[in-house]
Image: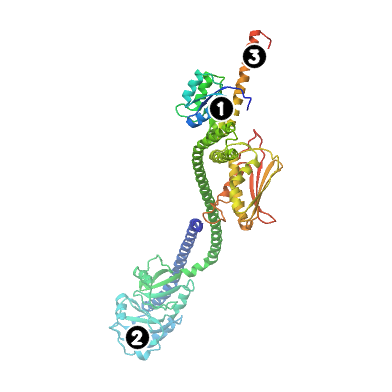
């Protein structure tokens, strides 16, 4: 936990206290973190900002998590998303994974679980980015693949 | 239950009655027709017989009467009137005509009513008598012939008088005939023991005694006489009546033929028919009984199944509603739980940054945070279980580890068992193979059997649950230390609505539904008593691997 890489996280949840608490905890652990109160604002921030991982609640007003996820993936295919669901909406968690979410978490959960999941998601994104970089480098240097 | 039994008993009764009538009505109809046909045939036969008899005997009787008249006619036609004036001549004639021995006396009388001569036993009584005013004498002179009614007269024996006159009507010859000779002729006309034959005059007075000793003429016979002894017989319920006129319609010869007597010929036939009908009736009754009972049983079974299905459906509806309610509550609780978790997590995060020397109760805080964490987790488990329960309504196939499913099921009732001091022993086969099945449905079966086992075990009882593999099947056994199942209940255990629990304690559907579910999952459920006491329920399920889902 101590030698964690620093990355950029967006917390999208309509529960203000949870959102602020989570952002606070993430910042405390040395991450870059911001909050958004619904799917629409979250989507805008993803489109404009430079987030590595999004923690996205499924049940939200204005724009729900699944819809926001779809749009985020369209705008930024490489951004990783971890969904937050109630048990009753496990199905939406699974649906979200089909749409490209990294994984889902069920409330109530401990902060360490959340952070671990976010790190895993970031790890995936990093490998993904490395691969792309390598491919581009290969292309530049015209190395045989 | 008592009311239901009454209902099905009445259904059985009504069915029985319906079938009974259905069988009996045609039988009775055929029987009635047969009986009537036989009677009709018999009456036609009897009519023929009576007609033949009356015709033949009337001829004989007429002949006898005619003979008497002819004899006298012959005498008056051939002999001169002066011949009869002599007593001696009359005596000679008497001897000549009494060849049958039925002529009682012979008398010759002058046209003015004076007696010429008399031969017979009553000479003194008739001596000097004048017949000028006697109606019979006048009738003889008027019609040339007279036949009297039968009377006993002075002689005390039945007799009648035949009188003729010569064509010049100058005298009358009169003979008294003993009519008892007719009686023997009538006997020949008696068709059967209760049949009758007799002669009456136009006024309906008996001229011969009725063979059956009747002293009044029946209405039917009177009708026949008033019709002038027409050819056609009259048929009544008891007898066939037929009449023929005698002596130019002065008398009537009447024969009655008893119907009952003639029917006796058919008694053996009747008896045979009766036996056949009785056998048919008994067979029909037996068939009606069997069919009614079977139908009623079938209806009862169908009704029970229907009721059970309805109740099962209602039960599922109820469960689903409870499930939705629980899910809603659980979901609402999860959010505050999340906040408790986050806040305590935050404290835990910040606490190490404090100067331990300055925080007096650091240890207490840490312990408190751990406890909060523990209890949030516990509450989370409960809400997740509630949420999971609500999802169990939808049938699904998934890979299930039965040991885990059983453990989860036991966790539902552990508190209940503890409160009754019941110990639950797990005797699970490690590495039990996974199987594709409907976990939630199966859990319902397990929960049911487990609840029954706990009920049966009672205070301080024991329940043992074991899993095993037998061939290609998984075997799960639920054994309890209770009293076992009564022999008579073993057969009905899986029937819908069968329960030995107190009213409102059990629906009687638990085992029925469990049986149904295991069967649908391709398995079986059976109940038996253990030799060591207590009941043993065994669930057997085929091991289905991924991709080979079995549904029955």
Q: Which residue is mark 1?
A: A28
Disc 3 and disc 2 on one polypeptide chain:
no
Lower sequence index among marks 3 and 1: 1
SS under mark 1: helix
Q: Nearer the viewer, mark 3 or mark 2?
A: 3
Spatial CA span between label 3 and label 2 = 183 Å
Q: Nearer the viewer, mark 3 or mark 1?
A: 1
Q: Which mark is residue A134?
A: 3
Judge the density around disc 2: few (<14), some (14-19), many (≥20) Cα neighbours within 10 Å. some
Q: Quadrant of the C terminus of chain B?
A: top right
Residue lying furthest front: B357
Spatial CA span between label 1 and label 2 = 182 Å
Give x and y (percent) for residue B360.
58, 38
Whether tag 3 and tag 2 are in contact, CB under 8 A, the answer is no
Q: Nearer the viewer, mark 1 or mark 2?
A: 1
Q: Is residue B59 above or below residue B477?
A: below
Question: Is residue B57 left or right of A73 when viewed as pictured?
Answer: left
Give x and y (percent) for residue B31.
49, 60
Q: Which residue is mark 2?
A: B85
Q: Foreground residue, B197 or B312?
A: B312
Q: Foreground residue, B506 or B88?
A: B506
Judge the density around disc 1: few (<14), some (14-19), many (≥20) Cα neighbours within 10 Å. some
Q: Name the chain under label 3.
A: A
Q: Foreground residue, A99 or A69?
A: A69
Q: Would residue B23 be visible to someone looking at this image?
A: no
Spatial CA span between label 3 and label 1 = 33 Å
Give x and y (percent) for residue A34.
51, 24
Q: Which mark is residue B163?
A: none
**Colour theme:** rainbow
Q: Foreground residue, B544 or B455?
A: B455
Disc 3 and disc 1 on one polypeptide chain:
yes
Q: Is residue B26 above or below residue B539?
A: below
């Amino acid at each position: 936990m101590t030698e964690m890489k620093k990355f950029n996280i967006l917390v999208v949840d309509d529960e203000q206290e949870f959102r602020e608490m989570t952002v606070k905890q993430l910042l405390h652990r040395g991450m870059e973190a911001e909050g958004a109160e619904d799917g629409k604002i979250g989507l805008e921030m993803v489109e404009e900002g430079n987030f590595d991982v999004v923690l996205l609640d499924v049940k939200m007003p204005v724009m729900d998590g699944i819809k926001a996820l779809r749009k985020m993936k369209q705008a930024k295919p490489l951004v990783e998303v971890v969904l937050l669901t109630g048990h009753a909406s496990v199905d939406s968690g699974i649906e979200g994974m089909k749409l490209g979410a990294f994984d889902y978490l069920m409330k109530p959960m401990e902060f360490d679980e959340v952070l671990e999941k976010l790190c895993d998601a970031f790890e995936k994104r990093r490998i993904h980015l490395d691969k792309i970089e390598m491919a581009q480098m290969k292309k530049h240097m015209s190395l045989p693949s | 239950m008592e009311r239901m039994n009454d209902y099905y008993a009445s259904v059985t009764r009504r069915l029985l009655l319906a079938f009974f009538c259905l069988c009996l009505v045609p039988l009775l109809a055929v029987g009635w027709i047969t009986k009537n046909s036989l009677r009709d045939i018999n009456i036609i036969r009897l009519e023929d017989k009576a007609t033949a008899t009356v015709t033949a005997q009337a001829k004989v009787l007429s002949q006898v009467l005619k003979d008497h008249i002819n004899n006298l006619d012959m005498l008056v036609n051939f002999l001169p009137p002066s011949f009869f004036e002599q007593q001696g001549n009359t005596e000679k004639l008497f001897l000549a005509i009494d060849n049958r021995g039925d002529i009682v006396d012979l008398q010759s009388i002058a046209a003015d009513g004076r007696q010429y001569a008399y031969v017979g036993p009553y000479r003194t009584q008739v001596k000097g008598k004048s017949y000028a005013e006697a109606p019979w004498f006048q009738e003889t002179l008027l019609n040339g012939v007279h036949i009297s009614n039968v009377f006993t007269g002075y002689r005390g024996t039945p007799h009648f008088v035949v009188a003729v006159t010569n064509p010049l009507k100058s005298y009358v010859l009169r003979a008294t005939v003993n009519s008892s000779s007719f009686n023997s002729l009538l006997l020949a006309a008696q068709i059967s023991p209760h049949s009758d034959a007799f002669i009456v005059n136009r006024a309906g007075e008996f001229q011969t005694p009725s063979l059956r000793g009747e002293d009044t003429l029946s209405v039917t016979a009177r009708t026949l006489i008033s019709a002038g002894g027409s050819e056609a017989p009259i048929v009544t319920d008891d007898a066939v009546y037929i009449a023929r006129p005698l002596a130019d319609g002065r008398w009537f010869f009447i024969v009655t033929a008893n119907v009952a007597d003639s029917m006796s010929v058919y008694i053996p036939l009747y008896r045979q028919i009766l036996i056949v009908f009785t056998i048919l009736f008994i067979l029909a009754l037996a068939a009606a009984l069997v069919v009614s009972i079977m139908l009623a049983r079938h209806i009862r079974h169908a009704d029970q199944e229907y009721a059970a299905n309805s109740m099962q459906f209602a039960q599922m509806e109820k469960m689903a509603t409870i499930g939705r309610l629980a899910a809603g509550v659980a979901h609402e609780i999860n959010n505050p739980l999340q906040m408790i978790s986050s806040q305590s997590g935050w404290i835990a995060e910040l606490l190490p940054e404090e100067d331990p020397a300055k925080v007096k109760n650091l240890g207490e805080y840490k312990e408190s945070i751990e406890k909060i964490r523990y209890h949030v987790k516990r509450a989370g488990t409960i809400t997740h279980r509630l949420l999971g329960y609500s999802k169990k309504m939808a049938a699904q196939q998934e890979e299930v580890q039965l040991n885990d499913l059983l453990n989860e099921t036991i966790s539902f009732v552990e508190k209940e068992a503890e409160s009754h001091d019941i110990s639950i022993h797990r005797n699970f086969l490690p590495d039990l193979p996974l199987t594709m099945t409907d976990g939630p449905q199966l859990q319902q079966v397990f929960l049911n059997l487990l609840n029954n086992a706990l009920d049966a075990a009672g205070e301080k009882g024991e329940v043992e649950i074991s899993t095993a593999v037998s061939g290609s099947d998984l075997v799960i056994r639920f054994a309890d230390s209770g009293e076992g199942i009564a022999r008579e209940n073993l057969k009905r255990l899986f029937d819908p609505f069968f329960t030995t629990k107190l009213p409102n304690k059990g629906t009687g559907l638990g085992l029925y539904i469990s049986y149904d579910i295991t069967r649908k999952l391709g398995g079986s459920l059976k109940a038996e008593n253990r030799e060591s006491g207590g009941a043993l329920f065994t669930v057997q399920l085929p091991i289905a691997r991924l991709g080979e889902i079995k549904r029955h």
